[in-house]
Amino acid sequence: MPKKNKKQSGKKIISMNPIIKNIVVFLVVLFAIGSFFSLYTSSQIPKKENVGIDTLIEDITQEKAEKIEVHGETVTVFLKDKNAPHHVIFKEPAESLSTLLKNYNVDPEILKKTRVEVSDSRASFWFNTLITLVLPFIIIAFFIWLMIRQVQGASNRAMSFGMSRARQFDKEAKVKVTFADVAGAKEAKEELAEVIEFLKTPQKFLDLGARVPKGVLLVGAPGTGKTLLAKAVAGEADVPFFLVSGSEFIEMFVGVGASRVRDLFQRAKKSAPCIMFIDEIDAVGRQRGAGLGGSHDEREQTLNQILVELDGFEPSTNVVVLAATNRPDVLDPALLRPGRFDRRVIIDLPTLVDRDAILQVHAKNKPLAADVELRKVAERTPGFSGADLANVMNEAAILVARRDGKEITINDLFMSIEKVILGPERKSHVMSDKEKKITAYHEAGHALVSHILPDAPPVQKISIISRGQAAGYTLNLPTEDKNFRTRNEFISELAVLLGGFVSEKMAFGDVTTGASSDLKKATRLARKLIMQYGMSEALGQRTLGEREELIFLGREITEQRDYSEKTAERIDEEISQLIDTAAKTAEKILTTSHETLEKLVSVLLEKETVERVEFEALFGEKQTKENPTA
């Protein structure tokens, strides 16, 4: 399959420049004809020297000439001296050579000693005449033929413009994806198992009067494996698979998208039983009435055609439409009603167990060291999607290949995690001693506050080596997955974010721009606590403001205020109070643990990087509610 696609893509590249291609072909043909004509004419004329009639008379009388050829008006004298060039004389066309020599009183006896050959020039005359007259007509006719063929090709492409661009994967494909290739997503697999069973044994459901959903919508964050699951369904059911993106329906010409939808559904019905997968359906399935085109909007007409085709499926038609999106909130309600996409399969971010299984899948063809425990890698990657985990394994393999290694170690995997989160190390970025010290105090402040607060996650690693846009970083990741977070956890997170800012201020009596990112995150988190989560004691248990997405000349998110100006002032006061309280909490911890802070700074300046094991060996295990005396 990949080779076939590669050839097809090559043809498309050539067809993109038909005018240039025709001009090049025309010039090549013209050059070939000119070269042939030049070769013919040059072959008729040997190495020569144009001379006068007196030289001809001299060559004959002094017996220098070996042979004389008469070709029309051209007289060529071949000399006995082989190194000398042939003498060429031009005479009058109507006058013969004998008459010419007689007029110059050449002795006939001497002329008899020289061989004279007269060739018929009529054939070359007619050939040259035909070449002169016919060749321009041949060139013009060839150019007209090229133009006609181009017009016919454009006509054929215009006829195929409304055909679907969907890629079809037959069930005989060499590489099949099954549920064994998809780790995690247990609930999603169970939901899709019904679709597989329907495609395999449809009569079992039809005999009981059951109707399997025509459309199944896969909803999940980017990289969670929606497309992979759709391919796995086709592989398990052993049926053809049609893959198309929602954006491939949209064109600048009205009606083309609807035509492609009709063609796609017709192809799918002919190949039934089969699976049709529309990736990123929100590109064409957004709520109608949001644009400026009215009834002539191309996207709305395409969506209308999809709705009609979904309704047009007969109960016995074994065609299942799968679609994927990470924005179900923007889809048109008519698309989600019963009878269309009436089943929604949620694909969540993988849990700790799922991440371990996903890493096992991506580690199959990679040489891992004997001491590698993928469970530890899974613990360090909360919130990672399947695509992120695949990227982690790939970056680790690239890292080992760069140093000409043979096995992937656990440290390589940890380094690849940091690269995916923060970016590559900036080894060329050399900090001064003062900047290094500021960074050490900043990161030590984050780490110490996170270590002491019981509701903050444990510290996994501290580093003052530049990576990405950060001068240093502190990784404090939870050891288990959480679906809910408490207010105390958010307050602790605010204190950890401000720990670096407070530590800098305490150590140097001044602050730097290095804390700007932390302050931005803290302000955003405090606003969410008050306006979205209802965790403000002063404003009560309510949400404030409604976020709306407007589709007008691009993507724009606006906030509709459902509160008064007085409440807006109280929101600002609450945000400032939360941040001030968090700063005071961080300052109290760092003041009480000043000696520990200085010790950690010294270790960072010496080693630049401190892992969790070494950190807890120096400062004890983390304090938690379950283990308050640690």
Image: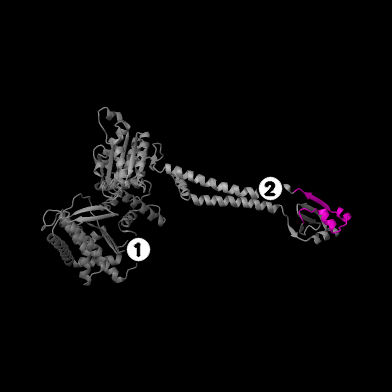
The colour scheme is: one colour
Residue 320 position, x and y percent, is 31, 37
Work out whether residue 12 or residue 586 is closer to the camera in this orientation and state it. Answer: 12
Residue 188 position, x and y percent, is 27, 41
Residue 346 position, x and y percent, is 25, 44
Q: Which one is closest to the eye, mark 1 or mark 2?
A: 2
Dot placed on the residue nearer the N-terminal end, 1 or 2: 2
Q: Amino acid at mark 1?
A: Arg
Work out whether residue 434 or residue 334 is closer to the camera in this orientation and state it. Answer: 334
Q: Which residues are magenta?
A: 91-120
Q: Residues within 10 Å of mark 2 (few under 14, many from 20)?
A: few
Work out whether residue 288 or residue 208 is closer to the camera in this orientation and state it. Answer: 288
User: Does residue 270 appear in the picture of this structure?
Assistant: yes
- Residue 127, disc: 2
Residue 545 position, x and y percent, is 17, 55
Taking 229 as reference, is 501 above or below it? Answer: below
Residue at 87% x, 53% y is: 112
